Image (tube, grey):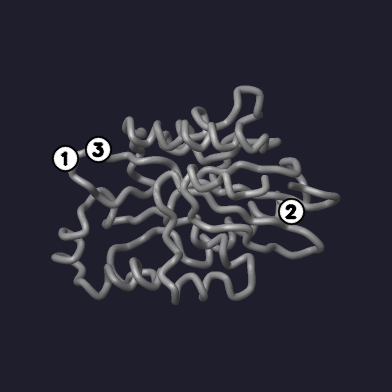
Amino acid sequence: MTAGGTRELLLVRHGNTFGPGDRVVWVGAGEDLPLVEKGREQARALGHALERLGWTPDAAVSSALVRQREHLEIAAAAEVPRSVDARLGELDYGAWGGRTTDELVAEFGADEVAAWNERSEWPAAGAWPESRGEVHARVRSFADDVARGALGARVLACSSNGLLRWFLELVPGAFEDARIEGRLKVRTGGACLLRFADGAWSVGFWNVAPDGLDAWDG
């Protein structure tokens, strides 16, 4: 619940883009996949949870990626203003995009793949177009807009797993703690709450499934 100058940023990862039997590949900025039925179910579950809680955002924002826009279109109430913001786009995985993990291990090595999966370290090979610093800059820029109330007191933002983890760096020590504990990854359809009050960000919760939001005070 917001009070005074408090801002709430509810970050969600879009739902599933692969169904049973599909070839599962790395999906970055260059892979513009729609949601599958399971993903649409996850978006509906989020919408139902927010309705039960009475948490109505002032704005719903995503990048132009189909999977993100579709998730918000289903989850957010019809009256909520929607907008597209490129700062919420997924990382561009370069030569890694559209390929399976086994294919990446075969070409680039298990250590390179593990460096990202386990420690969120940029690989030395594979030519990811965007640097870590550039990713940090767009996360901080979007968060600054939320903090100053440019989008309202409550903001629902849909993005993707590769980007969402970097919002933890807004809170001192939160990223490193989550990395050590293996909690950086946000599951498909998962939600995370950040609050801004008294000039600082804090983590309300991280990586909660829609059916777990009922424990949130809204």
Write down the residue under mark 1: 21
Compared with 70, 29 (above or below) is below
Amino acid type assigned to the residue bearing label 2 in the image: Ala
- Residue 103 percent location from the top left of the image: 16, 59
- Residue 182 percent location from the top left of the image: 41, 70
Q: Residue furthest top?
A: 78
Write down the residue under mark 3: 19
Write down the residue under mark 2: 147
* Crowding at mark 2 (Cα within 10 Å: few <14, some 14-19, many 20+): many
Seen at 65% across and 28% down, the residue is 80
User: Does the CB distance between marks 1 and 3 fall below 8 Å?
Assistant: yes
Q: Is 67 left, or right, of 208 in this rendering?
A: left
* Crowding at mark 3 (Cα within 10 Å: few <14, some 14-19, many 20+): few
Disc 2 versus disc 3: nearer the observer: 3
Distance, label 1 to label 3, CA atoms, is: 6 Å
Compared with 153, 109 (above or below) is below
Distance, label 2 to label 1, CA atoms, is: 42 Å
Report the front residue among 125 and 146: 146
Residue 86 in view of the camera: yes
> In terms of secondary structure, where does tag 3 sit?
loop
Q: Who comes first in sequence, dot 2 or dot 3?
A: 3
Q: Is 103 left, or right, of 145 in this rendering?
A: left
Q: How many marks?
A: 3
- Residue 35 percent location from the top left of the image: 36, 34
